[in-house]
Image (spheres, helix red, strand yellow):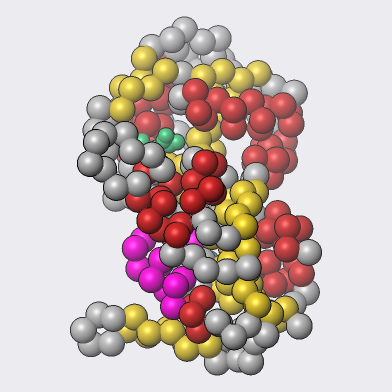
C-alpha cells in the first residue's frame, strides 16, 4: 500500500495529499547531531512511498537525499513542489556552475514531480523521469472567488506573462506584462509602461517571490498609474528576509500563494494537483 512521507519542509502539504488520496502517512524521525549533521529514520514499514519535500534551503535537499536513501528498498516517487536553484538552470557567464543540474542529478527515484519549476528545461537534467505540474488553474479558481473590480492580471516580466495569461483566461479577464531589468540579486528596475489600470484591481502574478524587489517596484509603478486594489499572487512564496513588510509598505492589499512553500500566505493548496498526478 502506498504511503506518504512529508519531509520537514512539506509537512502540511504531505498530510493534505495523503487525505486527498486517502492513504497513510509514514512517520519519520528527524534530528540533528551536536556537530550540525542531520539524521533521518523512517519509523514505519514501507514498500511503496511518495516523498514530498520542497527544496527551499540547502538543508532541505540534504533531508530529501537522506529520505530517498532511507527508502532505498521501496519503490519511491519524489515530489519536490518547490525546486530551488531552478533560476540557475543555465550558464549565463563563463565559469558558472549550472547549479540546477548539480541538484537534479542527485535525485534517484522512480519518478520526480515538480510544480511550476522556474525553468522547465531543468527537468532534462534529472536522470529519472521528471514531470512538472501547473498550479495556475488553482490560482485562477481562487481569484474567481474574490470580488474583483475590472481585474487585470500583470506579469512583471515576459516570463511571468504566460502565467498571467493562463490565470486571466480562467476568468476571461485582461492581462499584460511589464519590462524588467535585474540589476542585482535584490534590485530590479521595472520600466514604466502605460497600462490601462486606472480604477481597476490589479493582480501581479509571478512564479515566485524571493526578496519581493520585483513586486515592490511593480506595485509602486502601478499605483502611480492610479490602479485600484493591488493583489500579488505567486506559486512559490519564498518571501526572504523583509519581503512581506516591503510588499505591504509598497501598498499591496493581499499576498496570495500556494503551499509549495508553507507559510502564512500559502492559502491555496496544490494537494489536489499532486494527488491527481499520483493517482
Ligand atoms: C525570476 O525570473 C522570477 O520569476 C521572479 O521574478 C524573481 O525570482 C523574483 O525575485 P525577487 O522577489 O527577489 O525580486
**Is 246 above or below relative to 203?**
below
Relative to 188, does residue 193 appear above or below in the rendering? above
Locate ligand 1 by image quadrant.
top left
Q: Nearer the viewer, residue 45 or 156?
A: 45
Position of the N terminus by quadrant: bottom right
Report whether 156 appears left or right of 13. Answer: left
Find residue 110 and report its image quarter: bottom right
Q: Position of residue 99 (x, y in %)?
A: 35, 50
Number of numbered callouts drawn? 0
| Percent x, y of residue 261 | 49, 56
Is residue 99 visible in the rendered image? The answer is: yes
Q: Nearer the viewer, residue 25 or 75?
A: 75
Magenta residues (range):
54-66
Q: Residue at x 44, y 72 (%)?
A: 65
Is 188 positioned to the left or the right of 54 in the image?
left
In the rendered image, residue 263 lying in the magenta stretch gets the answer: no
Q: Nearer the viewer, residue 2 or 219?
A: 2
Magenta stretch prevailing secondary structure: helix
x, y percentage for residue 166? 66, 30
Query: Where does residue 180 sit, x and y in percent of width and height?
Result: 38, 22
Q: Residue at x 65, y 18 (%)?
A: 174
Q: Evaluate whether residue 261 shows in this view.
A: no
- Name above or below for residue 53 compared with residue 94: below
Q: Find out whether residue 59 is within the magenta segment.
A: yes
Amino acid at each position: 500500500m502506498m504511503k506518504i512521507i512529508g519531509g520537514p519542509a512539506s509537512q502540511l502539504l504531505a498530510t493534505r495529499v495523503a487525505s486527498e488520496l486517502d492513504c497513510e502517512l509514514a512517520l519519520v524521525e528527524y534530528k540533528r547531531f551536536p556537530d550540525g549533521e542531520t539524521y533521518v529514520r523512517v519509523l514505519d514499514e514501507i514498500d511503496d512511498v511518495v516523498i514530498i519535500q520542497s527544496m527551499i534551503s540547502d538543508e532541505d535537499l540534504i533531508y530529501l537525499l537522506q529520505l530517498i536513501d532511507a527508502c532505498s528498498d521501496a519503490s519511491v516517487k519524489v515530489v519536490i513542489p518547490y525546486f530551488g536553484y531552478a533560476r540557475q538552470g543555465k550558464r549565463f557567464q563563463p565559469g558558472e556552475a549550472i547549479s540546477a543540474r548539480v541538484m537534479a542529478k542527485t535525485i534517484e527515484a522512480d519518478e520526480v514531480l515538480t510544480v511550476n519549476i522556474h525553468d522547465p528545461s531543468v527537468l532534462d537534467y534529472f536522470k529519472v523521469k521528471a514531470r512538472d505540474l501547473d498550479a495556475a488553474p488553482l490560482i485562477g479558481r481562487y481569484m474567481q472567488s474574490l470580488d474583483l473590480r475590472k481585474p487585470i492580471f500583470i506579469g512583471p516580466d515576459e516570463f511571468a506573462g504566460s502565467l498571467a495569461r493562463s490565470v486571466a483566461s480562467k476568468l476571461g479577464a485582461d492581462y499584460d506584462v511589464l519590462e524588467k531589468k535585474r540589476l542585482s540579486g535584490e534590485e530590479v528596475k521595472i520600466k514604466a509602461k502605460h497600462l490601462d489600470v486606472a480604477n481597476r484591481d490589479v493582480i501581479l502574478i509571478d512564479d515566485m517571490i524571493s526578496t519581493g524587489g520585483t513586486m515592490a517596484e511593480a506595485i509602486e509603478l502601478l499605483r502611480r498609474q492610479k490602479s485600484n486594489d493591488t493583489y500579488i499572487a505567486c506559486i512559490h512564496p519564498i518571501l526572504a528576509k523583509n519581503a512581506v513588510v516591503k510588499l505591504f509598505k509598497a501598498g499591496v492589499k493581499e499576498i496570495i500563494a500556494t503551499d509549495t512553500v508553507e507559510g502564512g500566505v500559502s492559502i491555496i493548496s496544490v494537494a489536489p494537483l499532486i494527488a491527481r498526478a499520483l493517482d
